Image (cartoon, rainbow, N blue to C red):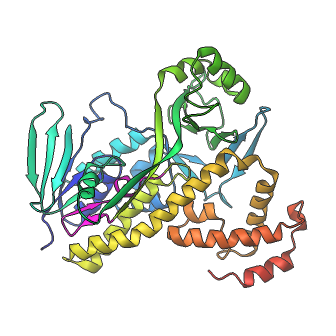
């Protein structure tokens, strides 16, 4: 089939407008169909509203399409983790090795609105709101919608449909009905509830804004990310069921005592925490694994629609944006052969999104439990020493993910090798100044990147 003149995208969240901008710059006409009203004119939320952490992979995509300079105005740099201990003490764990290695906090809603507006400014992108996708007949290349306002159903024929409609993708659901298509949602068992720390009486931040605040408590944790209005968006990640869980924490007195015992310094920061806890919804978390991501050259799913992950590495949006980067680059090699373009993209990219899905799960354990473990903290010091001694060869896993564009599967493999090196060097080690650099040099000589 010749390259389509017009491409239909399902979903105007974050990935849809970015991909539309990439495609518009290649001369394509794009129509996006979005289930929600236009959040720029209607008082609605941004859906799942955990604040986002934008790192290098996301920044690279925004720079490629010329959007970064405008969008960075709504970023707040975060240089590391600020750990809140049970005794109200705090300590700082830097993310990277220098001033240039930081991640950025951004409001999902603000980012979404800007991406839509900037996509429309290309003159080649039209967004249709309140249009819920019902599914697709791939044989006829017909995608069906219902107008959420009028409930009128309509059908549209399109040579190419790309699903950027999130973890509950209806386009993916249509693919599941085809032979050979596999999709599953793997629940985490932990959910989340958002809370908010407002600005102080002077309209300023109540805590240091240039860090990601974490209250690690073993099987659960609270985090807080800064907002431009000087507030913080907090998220409680908590078991859905069990003795200490969303299921068990119900009464006002129980909620109050729980926060007083487990997060004592938040009581002054959030004096209305009990009311917030009761009034704000509880949401679930999980991982989407699906394959393949395409139906010939007819349809493709990317981003959360293909590979939703848990948020604990801050890579869900970054991975989705990198999908757009890679798909765009591959278009140069495939010209009008979109069947093989979609198929090869699906196979190549899945290897890497599976890897970041696994790393995100592992990072949850690190964030909620290990960041206060003395051995873990010593291991981080050893990693920094090795990075200093062997620049470009030893790069901590977090840095490879967040501050480099090394493919995720390669990061995972290198990270596992590096763990064995660090564990070997930590045998009988009590402080980093006693690190055996001769042994480190021997181990690194055998480490092949």
**Residue 79 visible somewhere in the drawing:** no
- Residue 340: x and y in percent read 25, 76
Q: Residue at x 86, y 69 (%)?
A: 435
Q: Is residue 361 above or below residue 328?
A: above
Give whichever of 391, 354 is nearer the camera: 354
299 magenta-colored: yes
In the picture provided, is 302 more to the left or to the right than 410? left
Give whichever of 329, 371 is nearer the camera: 371
Q: Is residue 336 above or below residue 131?
A: below
**Residue 170 visible somewhere in the drawing:** yes
Numbered-mark total: 0
Q: Residue at x 78, y 64 (%)?
A: 382
- Residue 318: x and y in percent read 45, 56
In the picture provided, is 132 more to the left or to the right than 358? left
User: Magenta segment range?
Assistant: 292-309
Image quadrant in which you'd find residue 398: bottom right
Give whichever of 293, 100 is nearer the camera: 293
């Amino acid at each position: 089939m010749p390259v389509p003149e017009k491409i239909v995208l399902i979903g105007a969240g974050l990935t849809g407008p970015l991909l539309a901008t990439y495609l518009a710059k290649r001369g394509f006409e794009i129509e996006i169909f979005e289930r929600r009203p236009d959040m720029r004119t209607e008082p609605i939320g941004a859906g799942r509203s955990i604040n986002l952490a934008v790192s290098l992979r996301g920044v690279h995509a925004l720079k490629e399409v010329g959007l970064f300079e405008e969008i960075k105005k709504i970023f707040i740099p975060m240089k590391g983790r600020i750990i809140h201990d049970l005794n109200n003490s705090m300590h700082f764990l830097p993310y990277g090795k220098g001033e240039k290695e930081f991640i950025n906090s951004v409001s999902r809603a603000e980012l979404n609105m800007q991406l839509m507006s900037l996509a429309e400014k290309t003159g080649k992108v039209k967004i249709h709101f309140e249009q819920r996708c019902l599914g697709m007949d791939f044989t006829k290349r017909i995608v069906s919608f219902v107008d959420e306002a009028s409930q009128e159903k309509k059908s549209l024929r399109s040579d190419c449909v790309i699903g950027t409609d999130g973890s509950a993708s209806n386009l993916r659901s249509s693919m599941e009905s085809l032979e050979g298509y596999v999709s599953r949602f793997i629940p985490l068992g932990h959910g989340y509830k958002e809370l908010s720390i407002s600005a102080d009486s002077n309209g300023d931040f109540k805590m240091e804004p240039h860090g990601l605040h974490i209250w690690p408590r073993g099987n659960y944790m609270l985090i807080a990310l800064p907002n431009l209005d000087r507030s913080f968006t907090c998220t409680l990640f908590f078991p859905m069921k069990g003795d200490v869980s969303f299921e068990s924490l119900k009464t006002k007195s129980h909620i109050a005592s729980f926060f007083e015992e487990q997060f004592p310094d938040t009581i002054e920061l959030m004096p209305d925490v009990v009311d917030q806890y009761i009034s704000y919804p509880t949401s679930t978390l999980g991982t989407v694994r699906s394959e393949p991501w395409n139906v010939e050259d007819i349809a493709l799913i990317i981003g959360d629609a293909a590979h939703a992950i848990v948020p604990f590495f801050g890579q869900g949006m970054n991975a989705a944006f990198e999908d757009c980067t890679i798909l765009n680059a591959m278009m140069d090699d495939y010209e009008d052969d979109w069947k093989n373009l979609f198929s090869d993209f699906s196979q190549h990219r899945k290897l890497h999104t599976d890897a970041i899905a696994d790393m995100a799960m592992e990072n949850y354990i690190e964030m909620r439990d290990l960041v206060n473990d003395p051995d873990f903290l010593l291991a981080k010091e050893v990693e920094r020493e090795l990075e200093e001694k062997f620049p470009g060869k030893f790069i901590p896993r977090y840095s490879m993910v967040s501050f480099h564009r090394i493919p995720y599967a390669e990061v995972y493999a290198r990270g596992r090798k590096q763990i064995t090196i660090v564990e070997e060097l930590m045998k009988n080690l009590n402080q980093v100044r006693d690190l055996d650099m001769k042994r480190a040099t021997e181990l690194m000589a055998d480490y092949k990147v």
